[in-house]
Image: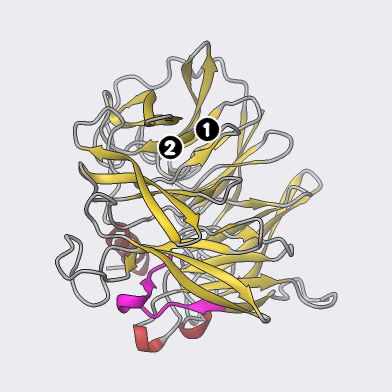
Amino acid sequence: MSGQESSRALFSDIHGCAAGLVLIVLLFAAALAQAQTFQVLYNFDDGATGALPNGGFAVDGAGNLYGTTQLGGLESCGCGAVFMLKRAGQGWVIKPLYQFTGESSGAGPFATVVFGPDGNLYGTTAGGGLLSCGYCGTVYKLQPPPSACENALCPWRETVLYSFAGGSDDGIYPADPLVFDAAGNLYGTTQQGGITNYNTPCFFNEQYSCGTAFKLAPSNGGWTESLIYKFMGENDGWHPVAGFSIDAAGNLYGTTYEGGAGSQGTVDELSPSNSGWTETTLYSFSMNGAAGYSGFNGVILDAVGNVYGATPYGGAGGGGTVYELMPTSGGWNLNVLYSILGQTDLSGPVGNLAMDSAGNLYGAAYSLGGDGLIFKLTPNNGTYTYSVLHQFDGDDGHGPQGPIAIDAQGNLYGTTFAGGTHDWGTVWEIAP
């Protein structure tokens, strides 16, 4: 097996899913009216900037893009990298900001980076960290060099804020993006770890259990980690794989990939109080449920507290759905905004949705039409109109799956996991 094939197998093992070709009868009915311009900004080649970009982007005020690659980077390690795409005239220039070295430095940044209140970049690695835990993952910070650097490849400085320990008191495999609250605390999830009961349905051994939610609080120049919730795999689901969104009150909203009352994942809310954190399951996915199934994707919030998400499987069309959860006095009401026509092999939406200022929703479908597509849902008198903004053909990318970023001009940015000139993934832009 080649190195590239091994990388693909590793990705499939970690996420528990496999991508394949999909037969679609109807895709383009509403697409022709779109005026967007698509272009590939960069083709990854497994070099200094890495390979297999899995996350989306952080966008700064100048419109520069910051992202991660799971593999590649430092030739001696291939442990992944953080990169920046900078506008240069009519084009773009890519620069590796940091190349992970494995072990204590971390390895395998599956999620994108986020900007902290201090302007630095923060992220997670699914591997690396404590040798005693078998390299269970890290949370890191990246800072620009302290002074001007004449070398174009001058790396940013990494600080590992926390290395996970696994077992009953900590998580393992933080492969999801982080969020900050108003006080500067960091929140995230680990896909496994945090054992609370040896009879939980997701218990395999001392390391591999239902997953956790954690908090990192700045303290005396460092950071203190605490678990705010340990998933049990029953009504609350198990394996949170998409991180959190946070509202103005500090409530956290996320999903689990499996478990829950319908055994196919959940949408959850974690609410802070003086006595700790309270978990509320807002919705449980099921194989035959209206919203489709598998909480593989995270959720986003609008200004009035409605929750929006997507599923890659099931629904009326078989290819997943885009849904809305609206708070009511007695709980939450489900509204399926659109059911996607497809099959059940990860054809539908993967990664968080994005919403623009007009309330339009954007998403990425991993393998619809063979190589995947970018779609838009436009609100129209209480319903949504579906349109395809771009259909990938392999040469311009395969498998779009990260969250879509929107800049101040309304340009859309994202990545494909594979495809492109070298078949190691691409960065794409759709301009209005």
Q: Does the magenta stretch include residue 182?
A: no
* Residue linked to disc 1: 362
| Image spot of residue 169 (x, y percent) | 35, 77
Q: Which residue is situated farthest in the top direction here?
A: 381
| Image spot of residue 339 (x, y percent) | 34, 24
On screen, residue 197 versus residue 103, left or right, reads left
Q: Which residue is situated farthest in the front direction here?
A: 274
* Residue 117 in which image quadrant: bottom right
* Depth order, front residue of 169/210: 169
Type of amino acid at the residue the image marks with label 2: Gly
Q: Residue at x 84, y 77 (%)?
A: 147
Element type at mark 1: strand
Q: Is residue 22 above or below residue 193?
A: above
Q: How far apart are marks 2 and 1 (CA)?
A: 11 Å
| Image spot of residue 319 (x, y percent) | 30, 31
* Residue 327 in which image quadrant: top left
Q: Residue at x 57, y 73 (%)?
A: 140
* Depth order, front residue of 11/266: 266
Disc on res. 309: 2
Asked whether the viewer can see residue 50, the reply is yes
Type of amino acid at the residue the image marks with label 1: Tyr
Asked whether the viewer can see residue 392, the reply is no
What's the magenta region? 161-174
Q: Is residue 250 above or below residue 395?
A: below
Neighbourhood count class around disc 2 (C-alpha, 10 Å): few under 14, some 14–19, many 20 upward: many
Quadrant (top left/top right/bottom left/bottom right) for the C terminus: top right
* Residue 118 in which image quadrant: bottom right
